[in-house]
Amino acid sequence: MHLAVIGGGAASVALLDALARSLAPGHRLRGVTVFDDSAQLWTGRPFQPDLTAVRVNLPPRQMSVRHDDATHFEQWLLRRPGLSPDDYRDKDLGQPLVPRGVYGEYLAQCARQALDELRRRGLAVEIVRERVTGYGHEDGVAFLETATGRHRADHMAVCVGTAAAPDHYGLAGLDGFVADPYPLATTLSTVAPDQDVTVIGSGLSAVDVVASLQSLGHRGGITLASRSGVLPFVQQRARPVEFQHLTKERLHALRDRAGELTLADLAPLMRAELQARGQDFTVLEQELRETYTEPPVDRLRRQIDAIDSPHMGRRLLVRAVRSLGPAALRLLSPAALGALRERHFRVLSSLCAPMVPLNARLLLRLFDSGRLTLATGLQKIESTAGGGFQVVTESGELRADVVVNAVNAAPHSAPSTAAPLFSALVASGVAGYDGTGGLVSASPTVHTLGDFSGGGLFITSSMAGLVARAQGVVAALHAA
């Protein structure tokens, strides 16, 4: 059996590591081929070398590539030459938050070690630096097509990463427009210190842009312009989380009793979790309800003050979404799914992809100084005759010398470069699309890992989620 891994980012590293450590005597796997034509093999777009101000957004124990060893990345950091345990420590979290480029080094080393182990176990291992453009069968053998030929693929793991930021305002090619901010060390290098910058979006990528401009000595004004004006939640100091009421068993029991699961069924379970801890559910309820109505800077200030709050509401909800989300989505009624995607998506995404306290405090200082502003109700952005841009929001117009596109791709979207492969997979009947546009397998030989996958959460995958999915793929390969 030959495995083709399409894509060479973090998801594929987790898969290769799990595969290399799970091979038992008598396994049927004979070869592995990795296809990736990008310039960032193993790191992908998120973890390529960049400014040290661009940090990983989670502590080391939540970034391990190993499902059964949460300390793996942490131990790697301790062994890395020139890096002490106190380097890059976020004092509020009590944890190091390393530059993404450092995490990329970890991914690359894990990938190399996994491939070396596969070779040691007798597998033929190949890295093809080409894009996969087609899929087919010949004489009962499945193959993938690249520019230079066909490659056997008895099983395939599709790990193509996420789509690029969409250009909602048609600014591509204009002088002063940054279509994709990463790597920030390159894209922001030409921004003059006194230029006024408008950042499209107010999520984690926008926060990265602000932190990077500050690290580069930028002195001009910065505006975060978005439709919602919702900033990411501020990450809280970790505390142990164990569920007593909000469990898979309770979710299945509720669905079996009523025939479907609704959002109204979930609130009492969270209420019970908090009551068991002597805490008030209305605190969490108010936090979520006021996401769109509370002034963003007031909310940012309040959440900074609550970094070490003993109230467990947000911690429980984030863990529930991450650990129970995929199972719950399969049980929810169509109406509940629609409400999550249409009315609650921004709240869930900002809750489950919080900014680290270090960056939250930086944003607050810049807001208080007047250098950073937030413009909501973004309507359009146009170039002006004299250079620069005119930005129109619901509260008025402003001018920008530079516009940086920091919006996220739509849920379940894939890179445009993967479109030919996806079309070929669907045309061959081995894959299809679900109701949200995510790719789903229709064959036991096709496995998907990443945000483009259908049938799962519609928020950005955490590393822990990718690692868990990689474990599932490896189990399926061994059972084949």
Image (cartoon, rainbow, N blue to C red):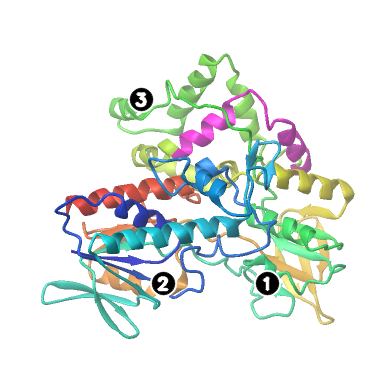
What residue sits right under mark 3 in the picture? 250
Q: Can residue 92 be seen in this snapshot? A: yes
Alpha-carbon distance for marks 1 and 2? 22 Å
- Mark 1 lies on a secondary structure that is helix
Alpha-carbon distance for marks 1 and 3? 50 Å
- Mark 3 lies on a secondary structure that is helix
Q: Residue type at mark 1: give it.
A: Thr
Q: Residue at horizontal 47%, vertical 38%? A: 321
Region of the chain picked out in magenta, as a range = 296-322
Q: Residue type at mark 2: give it.
A: Asp
Residue 314 spot, x, y in % from top left = 58, 32
Q: Residue at horizontal 43%, vertical 27%? A: 265
Residue 35 spot, x, y in % from top left = 36, 71
Q: Which mark is residue 36?
A: 2
Secondary structure mostly seen in the magenta stretch: helix
Horizontal relation, residue 181 to residue 331: left or right:
right
> Is 58 contained in the magenta span?
no
Image quarter (top left, top right, bottom left or bottom right) of the N terminus: bottom left
Q: Can residue 452 be seen in this snapshot? A: no
